[in-house]
Amino acid sequence: MSKHHSKPNPDDRSDNVEKLQNMVQDTIENIEAAHDTMRYASGEEKEQIKNKNARREESIQAMREEIKDEYHDQR
């Protein structure tokens, strides 16, 4: 039985800003889609959608802060 020694992948952060920006855009699109869904949702479902969108907004803020950090780290 042979032992496999795996090497960790190098930490390539060169495209983190772009990936984070895409994640922000995807999250914004999810919020917009959820708003469209709310038109057909019941009262309880609307409340769940509102809560989920609030969490999405918090995530967007955190990702934007991370984008700023990554941008400054690359400079």
Image (cartoon, grey):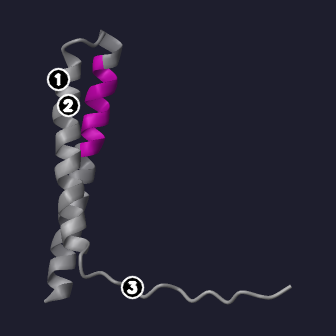
Q: How many marks?
A: 3
User: Which quadrant holds the C terminus?
Assistant: bottom left
The answer for how far apart the CA atoms under marks 3 and 1 are is 39 Å
Mark 3 or mark 1: name the one nearer the start of the chain.
3
Confirm whether the magenta stretch covers residue 7. Answer: no
Q: Which residues are magenta?
A: 46-56
List the residue tagged with mark 3: 11
Residue 46 location, quadrant:
top left
Q: Is residue 46 above or below residue 14?
A: above
x 57%, y 89%: residue: 7
Q: Secondary structure at mark 2?
A: helix
Return the residue at label 1.
Answer: 36
Chief secondary structure of the magenta portion: helix
Residue 5 at x, y percent in the picture: 67, 90
42 or 2, which is in the foreground? 2
Q: Residue at x 39, y 85 (%)?
A: 11
**Furthest residue toward front:** 1
Residue 62, relative to residue 37: is it above or below?
A: below
Residue behind mark 2: 33
Tags 2 and 1 in contact by the CB under 8 Å rule?
A: yes
**Which one is in front, 69 or 5?**
5
- Quarter of the figure with the N terminus: bottom right
SS at mark 1?
A: helix
Location of residue 21 in the rendering, given as x and y in whole percent from the top left corner = 17, 61
Does label 3 or label 2 sit earlier along the sequence? 3
